[in-house]
């Protein structure tokens, strides 16, 4: 089951917005204060038990004066055989439907409404239905990896050390963290193998330094995390650049999450990922997004053109804010990406990294066959050579 469209009505800066959702990755790009974060927050508020009240209602909508909550409506499609088997107990209609819609208009379970072909249907257990829908996970702040962690902290579930816990998971130590703390040959081998697996994963997605290496070192009941590359000896994560530390922490958390998840179990919402990264790092991050999208859909916001995978221009949504609130342009790529360039203020004069032998031509509005123009330049060059 995947999400095909999200409609948001009367949520903060959003008067009414229709967001087409890509089956894998949706990219929202736009200026500051255009409503990108509000769009993500609106989607997140669809979750049961998420904060949702008329305090979030758009102040220039009729809903505000009526004291009503916003409305979040989500279209679901591509139901698998397993999806149908799970949903049939709540309604027989799921035996044959290809698409259905769920709308949230308040904070209670009774404020969820299910529609098939624009007609509301009754379900026997709305909570059970919501449990089987993709779960929205909002990430705007990643817990940065630390230099050290002790065994007791790993085992007590302290959320501030989730990144270190997830690091061990991608090293193959899922719920068996204790083994690397053993003062034995088995413990040392487990630590070395985990270090090797983690290094292998990180090298695959961090092209800026192919010699990067992650090393786990245990002293008593304390685990130390060290990082090295071709130019430095082993050092602590906190001594590395903020960009690399953020990237490593992001990758650890999301890959660990998707390792254990079923297909389309989660729908990730990311606000400004890679903001601390060099453009080359941002390009690496888009590849990680592709990895995440193999199993789960995701939406992320950005200001950076380097966070756009140009192989998939149909994924980009330009977010802008006008008199009618936040709106979405789903054809950011038309006219040589003109809507996108206008939204972030990117002009040709801003692109100062040109090749030594470059030619910039401004063509008139009257159409002239392009081959004739190049023949003109060629004839001029031939005359100069004589």
Image (cartoon, helix red, strand yellow):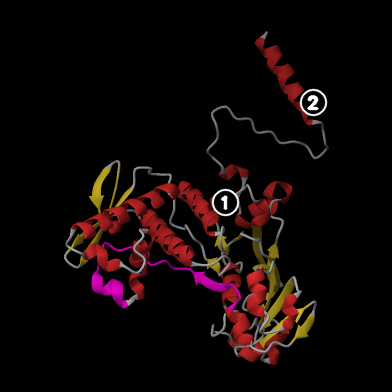
- Is residue 216 in view from this perspective? yes
- Is residue 236 in view from this perspective? no
Q: Residue at x 59, y 43 (%)?
A: 349
The quadrant of the rendering that contains the C terminus is top right
**Could you tell whether 73 is left or right of 173 in the image?**
right
* Residue found farthest to the top: 386
Q: Work out whether 152 lies above or below 258.
A: below
Mark 2 and mark 1 lie on one chain; the one further toward the N terminus is 1
What kind of element bears circle 2? helix
Give the Cα separation between the discs numbered 2 and 1. Answer: 33 Å
The dot on residue 305 is 1
**Could you tell whether 121 is left or right of 200 in the image?**
right
The one nearer the camera, 101 or 238, is 101
What kind of element bears circle 1? helix
Q: Residue at x 72, y 56 (%)?
A: 331
The one nearer the camera, 126 or 149, is 126
Quadrant housing residue 243: bottom left
Q: Residue at x 50, y 54 (%)?
A: 288
Q: Residue at x 69, y 33 (%)?
A: 361
Which residue does the numbered mark 2 point to in the structure image?
372
Residue 138 included in the magenta stretch of the image: yes
Look at the image and give the residue range highlighted in magenta.
132-156
The quadrant of the rendering that contains the N terminus is bottom right
């Amino acid at each position: 089951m995947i999400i095909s469209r999200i409609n948001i009505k009367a949520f903060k800066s959003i008067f009414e917005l229709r967001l087409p959702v890509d089956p894998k990755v949706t990219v929202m790009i736009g200026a500051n204060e255009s409503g990108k974060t509000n769009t993500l927050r609106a989607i997140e508020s669809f979750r049961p038990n998420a904060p949702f009240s008329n305090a979030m209602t758009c102040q220039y909508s009729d809903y505000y004066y009526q004291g009503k909550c916003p409305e979040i409506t989500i279209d679901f499609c591509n139901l698998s055989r397993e999806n149908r088997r799970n949903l049939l107990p709540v309604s027989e209609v799921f035996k044959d439907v290809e698409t259905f819609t769920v709308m949230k208009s308040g904070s209670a379970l009774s404020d969820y409404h299910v529609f098939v072909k624009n007609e509301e249907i009754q379900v026997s257990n709305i909570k059970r239905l919501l449990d089987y829908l993709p779960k929205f996970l909002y990430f705007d702040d990643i817990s940065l990896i630390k230099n050290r962690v002790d065994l007791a902290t790993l085992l007590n579930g302290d959320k501030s050390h989730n990144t270190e816990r997830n690091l061990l998971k991608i090293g193959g130590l899922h719920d068996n963290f204790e083994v690397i703390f053993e003062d034995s040959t088995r413990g040392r081998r487990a630590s070395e193998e985990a270090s090797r697996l983690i290094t292998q994963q990180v090298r695959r997605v961090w092209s800026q330094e192919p010699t990067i290496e992650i090393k786990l070192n245990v002293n008593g009941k304390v685990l130390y995390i060290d990082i090295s590359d071709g130019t430095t000896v082993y050092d602590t994560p906190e001594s590395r650049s903020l960009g690399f530390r953020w990237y490593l922490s992001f990758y650890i958390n999301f890959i660990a999450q998707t390792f254990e998840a079923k297909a389309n179990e989660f729908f990730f919402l990311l606000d400004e990922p890679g903001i601390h990264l060099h453009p080359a790092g941002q390009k690496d991050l888009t590849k990680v997004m592709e990895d995440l999208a193999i199993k789960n859909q995701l939406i992320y916001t950005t200001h950076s053109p380097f966070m756009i995978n140009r192989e998939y221009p149909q994924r980009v949504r330009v977010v802008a804010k006008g008199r009618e609130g936040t709106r979405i342009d789903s054809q950011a790529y038309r006219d040589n990406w003109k809507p996108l360039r206008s939204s972030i203020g990117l002009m040709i004069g801003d692109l100062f990294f040109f090749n030594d032998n470059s030619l910039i031509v401004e063509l008139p509005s009257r159409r002239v066959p392009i081959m004739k123009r190049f023949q003109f330049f060629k004839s001029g060059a031939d005359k100069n050579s004589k």
